[in-house]
Amino acid sequence: MRSVNKVILVGNLTRDPELKTTQGGQSICTFGMATNRQWKDAEGKPRDLAEFHEITAWGGRGDICHQILKKGNLVYIEGYIKTRNWLDEETQKKRYRTEVVVDDVIKLEKRPQGEITPGDKPVVEVNEAEGAAATEAFGAEPEEKPEEKPEEKPEEKPEEKPEEKEEITENF
C-alpha cells in the first residue's frame, strides 16, 4: 500500500537560519518556524495554539534560505517529515529529532494588520521574482468569469388539475 509523507506549512521563522557544511562539503541550513491554529471553544471564546517546527534545507536550497530568510519572515514551506536519531556522547542516551526537510520554500510578505478578516478568501502576496513559484505552489490562476448564458425558460406544460387529497396537519 502506498503512503504519503508530505508537509505544507505557512508560518513565521522563530530564529535566523543557521548554515553549516557537512564533512562532504554539502550545505545544510536549519531554522525554527511557528504556525498558529485558531478556533472557538465550546463557549465560543477564541482560542489559538502555536506549534513549533524544526526545518532543514540541504544544498542549494539551504544556501538560498540562509541568504534570503530572517527571523520573523513569513514563509511557505513544502517538504517531508524526517526523524533522525543519534547517541548523545555526554549522556550515552539515544536522542531523536523530528524535522521538516525542505523541498520548496517561498518567502511571503505579511499583510498590514487588520487587512484580512475571518471568512475572507486567503490571498498570498509575494515579491515579483517569486510570484510564479507561489502561483505554482498554491495552484492559483487568474480568476476567469464563466460565460453568461441567456436564461432558458422551461417548457410550459398544460395545466393539470390537482387531485383532491385530505390535508393532514401535525405540529412537531
Image (cartoon, rainbow, N blue to C red):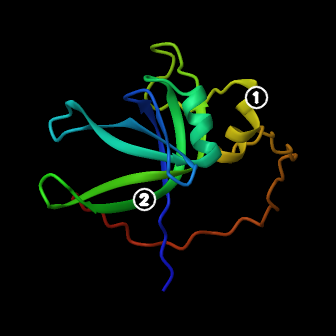
Compared to residue 24, the image places residue 136 above or below, namely: above
The part of the image, by quadrant, that contains residue 50 is top left
Which mark sits nearer the N-terminus, 1 or 2? Answer: 2
Q: Looking at the picture, how far across and down is residue 106, in whole percent?
A: 61, 37
Residue on which the image places disc 2? 81
100 vs 132, left or right, is left
Name, please, the residue furthest toward the front.
23
Label 2 neighbour load within 10 Å: few <14, some 14-19, many 20+: some
Q: Nearer the viewer, residue 88 or 137?
A: 88
Residue at numbered disc 1:
129
The kind of residue tagged 2 is: Ile
SS class, disc 2: strand
Examine the rendered structure and indicate whether residue 166 appears above or below residue 116.
below
Label 1: how many Cα within 10 Å (few below 14, some 14–19, many 20+)? few
- Measured as percent of width and height from the top left, residue 112 is found at 51, 13
Where is residue 55, by image quadrant? top left
- Element at badge 1? helix
Q: Position of residue 129 (x, y in %)?
A: 76, 28
26 is higher (above) or lower (below) than 94? above
